[in-house]
Structures are given as structure tokens and as C-alpha cells.
Amino acid sequence: MAFRPLNARAPAALLREAKPLKALFSQAQRLSHLQRLLESQLQPAAREHCYVASWREGTLLLVVTDGHWATRLRYQQKRLQRDLQALDEFNSLTRVLFKVQPSVTQSKAAERNIDLSSRSAEHIQATADGISDPKLRAALERLASHGRPAV
């Protein structure tokens, strides 16, 4: 009795046929459609900062990338709600909520630049020379090594 693997199927076919994947795929398509409708009502500058998170029971939840854009959109909330209600998909819209959630790409730690004068580096090195704790001494010496050379 030999093992016979199943025939490979295209990912698109799996998305259309497997029940959990089918539901997930249809929800993603629905959100994508709602996103396009939302973008048709937003200013061009705001489009890249505002995303549809959910639409249920008359409440539209929008995720905004920063507080600045959330404030601007809250000022336009009544107009936005009125314009969206004119569309068939949003005719039962009663509330628009905004949630600030910074994008993942922005949350990466910025590269730190330590700008330390040569005199400050000398003082830190002198302090490190008088420290008996090896870990603290090593940390101070690393910090002193960032001093810029005297010009």
C-alpha cells in the first residue's frame, strides 16, 4: 500500500471551496469593497491613513494611522456619515467610530544616533576608569566610544 498524495490544487480554488477559507475570503472581499467606497468619499490625502476595520449593526469602525488624521476625520464625521449613507451599502449607517492604530512599519525603532562631543566622551571614560562593577564599566566605555573626534 503506497502513499499517494492528493493532486495539488490552485490556491484560488482552495479559497473558493474550503468552508473556513471561503468565509474568510468573502469577508476580505467585502472589506475591500467597503474600503473602495470609503476612499471615494475621503480627501485624497486622507485615503492612505484610514482603513475599514468592521461594518456591523449600523456601526462603521475605521482604523486611522495617527491621532492627527483621526482628529481631522472626526471634524468631518457628520459629512462623511451623510455621504456614506447615500450609498446603498451604508444606507443603515448610524455611527462612525475612529480608532487610532499606528501602522506596523512606523513602529519600527528609529536608528539611534548618539552625538557625543570628544570632551564628553573623555569625561565618561574617566568615570568608567573609576568604576569597579565590570558591567557598568563596559557600558560606560561603549558610550564613551561614540564620542566624535576633536576637530
Image (tube, rainbow, N blue to C red):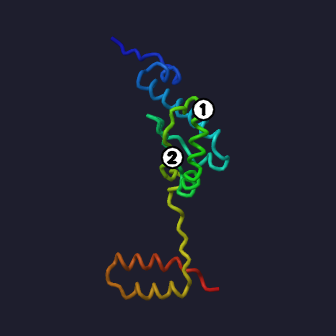
Question: Residue 112 appears at what percent x and percent y?
Answer: 53, 68
Residue 69, percent from left and from top: 57, 54
Place residue 51 in its image quadrant: top right
Neighbour class for label 2 at 10 Å: few (<14), some, many (≥20)?
many
In the image, residue 124 sits, relative to residue 39, either above or below, namely below
In this rendered view, identify the residue nearer to me: 23 or 86: 86
**What residue appears at the point 53 percent right and 30 percent down from the top-left corner?**
30
The residue to which callout 1 is attached is 87
Secondary structure at numbered mark 1: loop
Q: Secondary structure at mark 2?
A: strand
Q: State the separation of the CA atoms marked 2 and 1.
A: 20 Å
Q: Amino acid at mark 1?
A: Leu
- Which residue in the protein does label 2 denote? 63
Marks 2 and 1, the one that precedes in the sequence: 2
Which residue does the image show at 32% across and 84% down from the upper left?
132
Q: Position of residue 75 (x, y in %)?
A: 57, 53
- Foreground disc of the pair 2, 1: 1
The C terminus lies in quadrant: bottom right
Could you tell me the amino acid type at mark 2? Val
Q: Is residue 138 above or below residue 15?
A: below
Looking at the image, residue 89 sits to the left or right of residue 59; the answer is: right
Quarter of the image for the N terminus: give it.
Answer: top left
- Relative to residue 21, is residue 77 drawn left or right? right
